[in-house]
Image (tube, grey):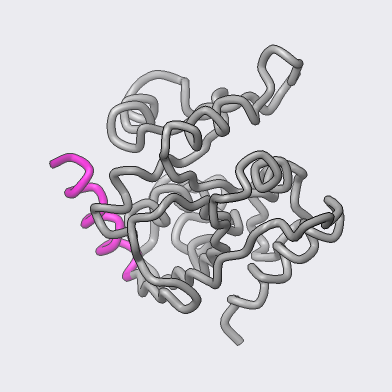
Amino acid sequence: MTASLLASFTRLLTGVRTRWQGCAPVAEQRVYFANHTSNLDLILLWAVMPPEIRRRTRPVGARDYWEKGGIREWLARRVFHAVFIERHAVTRENNPLVPMLDALRDGDSLIIFPEGTRNPDGEVNPFKPGLFHLAKAQPQVALVPVFIENLNRVLPKGEVLPVPMLCTVTFGEPLRLAPGEAKPQFLTRAREALLALRPR
């Protein structure tokens, strides 16, 4: 019930329009990768998914941000069932790929932000290598680009209270790692697939 109410409130607050432009909203295992401009990105992308997809889709978030106690951590654990990863002082023992691969092996889908950090000016930074490693380790899982438009204006960086604003979430055509495709070429292709969804 909490998940349903939160999803409805998020859609109402942002006035979001959802476009499944390159794929259908079906409950198959996927990695959804999106641009990152706001703290609400994770919540909005999760909220626009149909309930049957949302139930098996786990957002990936930084442990140091989400594990601070209070309502934020409660939502991450109990509602989003988030996958927590380390982003500082990464070692072999706390490799951020391990919990993501564990979730994929369990049959869950993921939401990730391959830029690695928010870019509030709306540009899309070069991708970190994590998306490539997921594609290489789990080649059967479709990678779906998702472009989130205007959310940085709903909750600008440094602000606490959101401002109602019309947003658009566009899901693109799934892609996979091609045989023999090198990491730089794959990451460039994935970023270009995301940018192609940006409204003109």
Place of residue 98 in the rendered image (x, y in percent of width and height, measured from the top left): 61, 25
Question: Could you tell me which residue is drawn at 47 percent across and 28 percent down?
Answer: 66
Which range of residues does the magenta coloring cover? 1-15
Q: Is residue 82 left or right of residue 51?
A: right
Question: Could you tell me which residue is drawn at 46 percent across and 78 percent down?
Answer: 21
Q: Is residue 12 left or right of residue 141?
A: left
Q: How many marks?
A: 0
Give the quarter of the image for residue 154: bottom left
**Quadrant holding the N terminus:** top left
Place of residue 10 in the rendered image (x, y in percent of width and height, measured from the top left): 30, 56
Whether the magenta-drawn stretch holds residue 4 is answered as yes
**Quadrant holding the C terminus:** bottom right
182 or 159: which is nearer to us? 182
Q: Is residue 59 above or below residue 78?
A: below
- Name the chief secondary structure element in magenta: helix
53 or 163: which is nearer to us? 53
Place of residue 118 in the rendered image (x, y in percent of width and height, measured from the top left): 64, 49
Q: Is residue 159 left or right of residue 185?
A: left
Question: Could you tell me which residue is drawn at 54 percent across and 24 percent down?
Answer: 63
140 or 3: which is nearer to us? 140
Whether the magenta-drawn stretch holds residue 79 is answered as no
Q: Is residue 83 above or below residue 54?
A: above
In the picture as drawn, the residue positioned furthest to the left comes out as: 1
Q: Is residue 175 left or right of residue 75?
A: right
In the picture as drawn, the residue positioned furthest to the bottom comes out as: 200
